[in-house]
Image (spheres, rainbow, N blue to C red):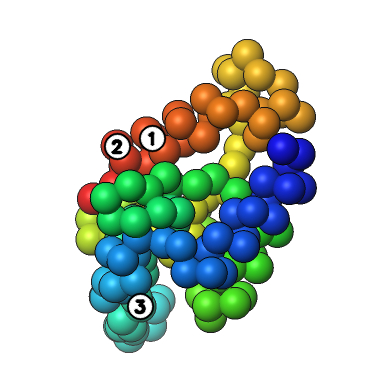
Protein backbone atom coordinates (compact mmCIF):
# COMPACT_ATOMS: atom_id res chain seq x y z
CA UNK A 1 0.00 0.00 0.00
CA UNK A 2 1.43 3.40 -0.92
CA UNK A 3 1.63 6.18 1.68
CA UNK A 4 -1.17 8.02 -0.14
CA UNK A 5 -3.40 4.91 -0.11
CA UNK A 6 -2.68 4.33 3.58
CA UNK A 7 -3.54 7.93 4.54
CA UNK A 8 -6.71 7.70 2.48
CA UNK A 9 -7.68 4.46 4.24
CA UNK A 10 -7.01 6.02 7.66
CA UNK A 11 -9.18 9.02 6.79
CA UNK A 12 -11.97 6.83 5.39
CA UNK A 13 -12.08 4.61 8.50
CA UNK A 14 -12.14 7.53 10.92
CA UNK A 15 -14.80 9.39 8.93
CA UNK A 16 -16.92 6.20 8.85
CA UNK A 17 -16.80 6.22 12.64
CA UNK A 18 -14.49 3.23 13.04
CA UNK A 19 -13.06 4.49 16.34
CA UNK A 20 -13.28 3.05 19.84
CA UNK A 21 -16.29 4.15 21.85
CA UNK A 22 -14.09 5.48 24.66
CA UNK A 23 -12.67 8.13 22.29
CA UNK A 24 -16.15 9.56 21.77
CA UNK A 25 -16.33 10.80 25.38
CA UNK A 26 -14.36 14.02 25.62
CA UNK A 27 -12.71 14.95 28.90
CA UNK A 28 -12.93 18.48 30.34
CA UNK A 29 -9.61 20.13 31.17
CA UNK A 30 -9.52 23.44 33.03
CA UNK A 31 -6.82 25.83 31.93
CA UNK A 32 -5.64 28.79 33.94
CA UNK A 33 -3.21 31.56 33.06
CA UNK A 34 -2.21 34.79 34.70
CA UNK A 35 -1.60 37.89 32.60
CA UNK A 36 1.28 40.27 33.42
CA UNK A 37 -1.36 42.62 34.87
CA UNK A 38 -2.26 39.95 37.42
CA UNK A 39 -5.63 39.19 35.89
CA UNK A 40 -6.36 35.47 35.86
CA UNK A 41 -7.96 33.88 32.81
CA UNK A 42 -9.68 30.51 33.05
CA UNK A 43 -11.15 28.29 30.36
CA UNK A 44 -12.39 24.75 30.04
CA UNK A 45 -11.52 22.78 26.94
CA UNK A 46 -12.58 19.26 26.01
CA UNK A 47 -10.04 16.74 24.75
CA UNK A 48 -10.03 13.10 23.73
CA UNK A 49 -8.91 10.77 26.54
CA UNK A 50 -6.25 9.09 24.38
CA UNK A 51 -4.61 9.35 20.96
CA UNK A 52 -6.84 8.78 17.94
CA UNK A 53 -7.27 5.10 17.11
CA UNK A 54 -9.04 2.87 14.63
CA UNK A 55 -11.09 -0.11 15.82
CA UNK A 56 -13.29 -1.03 18.76
CA UNK A 57 -12.81 -0.68 22.52
CA UNK A 58 -11.52 -4.26 22.61
CA UNK A 59 -9.39 -4.22 19.47
CA UNK A 60 -7.89 -0.92 18.36
CA UNK A 61 -4.68 0.58 17.05
CA UNK A 62 -3.51 4.08 17.87
CA UNK A 63 -2.75 5.27 14.38
CA UNK A 64 -0.04 7.71 13.33
CA UNK A 65 -0.95 9.89 10.37
CA UNK A 66 0.45 12.75 8.34
CA UNK A 67 -0.47 16.40 8.87
CA UNK A 68 -2.89 16.47 5.93
CA UNK A 69 -4.90 13.53 7.32
CA UNK A 70 -4.83 14.86 10.90
CA UNK A 71 -5.97 18.31 9.74
CA UNK A 72 -8.80 16.84 7.62
CA UNK A 73 -10.07 14.82 10.59
CA UNK A 74 -9.81 17.77 12.97
CA UNK A 75 -11.65 20.04 10.52
CA UNK A 76 -14.40 17.48 9.86
CA UNK A 77 -15.17 17.07 13.58
CA UNK A 78 -14.58 20.67 14.64
CA UNK A 79 -11.41 19.98 16.63
CA UNK A 80 -8.12 21.83 16.76
CA UNK A 81 -4.77 20.12 16.47
CA UNK A 82 -2.78 20.47 19.69
CA UNK A 83 0.60 22.13 19.76
CA UNK A 84 3.54 20.27 21.28
CA UNK A 85 3.42 22.50 24.37
CA UNK A 86 -0.33 22.06 24.75
CA UNK A 87 -0.17 18.30 24.26
CA UNK A 88 2.25 17.79 27.16
CA UNK A 89 1.00 16.02 30.27
CA UNK A 90 1.83 19.10 32.33
CA UNK A 91 -0.38 21.31 30.17
CA UNK A 92 -3.22 18.83 30.44
CA UNK A 93 -2.70 18.33 34.18
CA UNK A 94 -2.43 14.57 33.76
CA UNK A 95 -6.05 14.21 32.69
CA UNK A 96 -5.94 13.52 28.97
CA UNK A 97 -3.43 13.03 26.18
CA UNK A 98 -4.67 15.10 23.27
CA UNK A 99 -7.14 15.66 20.48
CA UNK A 100 -5.57 13.93 17.53
CA UNK A 101 -2.71 11.49 17.22
CA UNK A 102 0.60 13.27 16.81
CA UNK A 103 1.85 13.58 13.28
CA UNK A 104 4.15 10.75 12.27
CA UNK A 105 7.82 11.59 12.61
CA UNK A 106 10.83 9.39 12.06
CA UNK A 107 13.32 9.50 14.89
CA UNK A 108 16.80 10.53 13.84
CA UNK A 109 18.23 7.51 15.63
CA UNK A 110 16.09 5.19 13.49
CA UNK A 111 17.80 2.99 10.94
CA UNK A 112 14.85 3.62 8.61
CA UNK A 113 15.18 6.57 6.25
CA UNK A 114 12.48 9.25 6.62
CA UNK A 115 11.08 8.40 3.19
CA UNK A 116 10.64 4.75 4.19
CA UNK A 117 9.65 5.37 7.81
CA UNK A 118 5.94 5.68 7.16
CA UNK A 119 5.95 2.44 5.20
CA UNK A 120 7.40 0.35 8.01
CA UNK A 121 4.83 -1.82 9.81
CA UNK A 122 7.07 -1.78 12.86
CA UNK A 123 6.80 2.01 12.99
CA UNK A 124 3.02 1.76 13.49
CA UNK A 125 3.48 -0.92 16.16
CA UNK A 126 6.12 1.16 17.94
CA UNK A 127 4.03 4.34 17.74
CA UNK A 128 1.07 2.46 19.21
CA UNK A 129 3.25 1.13 22.05
CA UNK A 130 4.72 4.57 22.78
CA UNK A 131 1.21 6.03 22.83
CA UNK A 132 0.04 3.33 25.24
CA UNK A 133 2.97 4.09 27.54
CA UNK A 134 2.13 7.82 27.42
CA UNK A 135 -1.63 7.37 27.86
CA UNK A 136 -3.12 8.40 31.14
Q: Residue at x 53, y 78 (%)?
A: 77
Residue 104: x %, y % from top left: 59, 42
- Return the residue at label 1: 130
Few, some or many residues within 10 Å of mark 3 (<14, 14–19, 20+): few
Residue 62: x %, y % from top left: 43, 47
Q: Do the residues labelled 1 and 2 touch (CB within 8 Å)?
A: yes
Instruction: Examine the image and state in which quarter residue 69 appears.
Output: bottom right
Depth check: give the residue in front, 135 or 58: 58
Q: Residue 45 carries which label?
A: 3
Residue 25 vs 99, above or below: the answer is: below
Residue 115: x %, y % from top left: 76, 29
**Mark 1 residue element:** helix
Q: Which of marks 3 and 1 is in front?
A: 1
Q: Are marks 3 and 1 in contact (CB under 8 Å)?
A: no
Depth check: give the residue in front, 20 or 117: 20
- Return the residue at label 2: 133
Q: Which of marks 2 and 3 is in front?
A: 2
Amino acid sequence: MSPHERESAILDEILKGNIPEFLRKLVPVKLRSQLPSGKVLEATIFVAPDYLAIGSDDDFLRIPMNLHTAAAIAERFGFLLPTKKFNSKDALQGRAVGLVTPIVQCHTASQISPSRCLDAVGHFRDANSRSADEAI
